[in-house]
Image (cartoon, grey):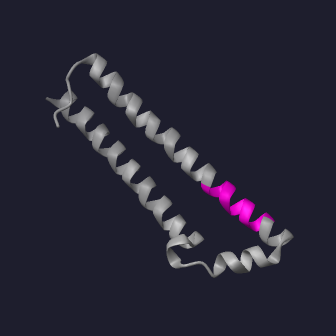
Amino acid sequence: MELAKGPKSDEKINYLINQGDVLVNYIEWDFAEIKALLAQDGAQYPSIETQFKALPAAKSLDSLERRKDGLINQIHTTQTNLRQHLENRKAA
């Protein structure tokens, strides 16, 4: 896929890069909220924490954290690629 060229295009690419940062912040915040709620519920209702730890790996907090990290890495890679694209266009 070829990105359009020109000042408006550069603005759109920079907007996408910035939106990546916003998305990462939301993902990190949501994950922190999940962990806090589980810790709170686990302290209030110890059986919840025990039950949660017994869930299959696909539903575990560790698995969720790995998926979160993978998603964030994909966003960062996309941002890096977009920045490189802008630099290459400026150099051309």
For residue 13, above or below residue 37? above
**Which image quadrant is residue 86 in?**
top left
Between 91 and 48, the one lying in front of the other is 48
Q: Position of residue 1 (x, y in %)?
A: 17, 37
**Which image quadrant is residue 51 in?**
bottom right
Residue visible at 40% across and 36% down in the picture? 17
Residue most toward the right?
44
Q: Position of residue 37 (x, y in %)?
A: 74, 60
Start-end of magenta stretch: 31-40
Q: How many marks?
A: 0
Residue visible at 72% across and 65% down in the picture? 38
For residue 47, above or below residue 65? below
User: Is 82 positioned to the left or the right of 18 in the image?
Assistant: left
Residue most toward the left?
92
Overall secondary structure of the magenta section: helix
Please say whether residue 38 is one of the residues in the magenta stretch.
yes
Q: Position of residue 67 (x, y in %)?
A: 46, 63
Q: Position of residue 34 (x, y in %)?
A: 66, 59
Please say whether residue 37 is one of the residues in the magenta stretch.
yes
Between 12 and 45, the one lying in front of the other is 45
Residue visible at 31% across and 38% down in the picture? 83
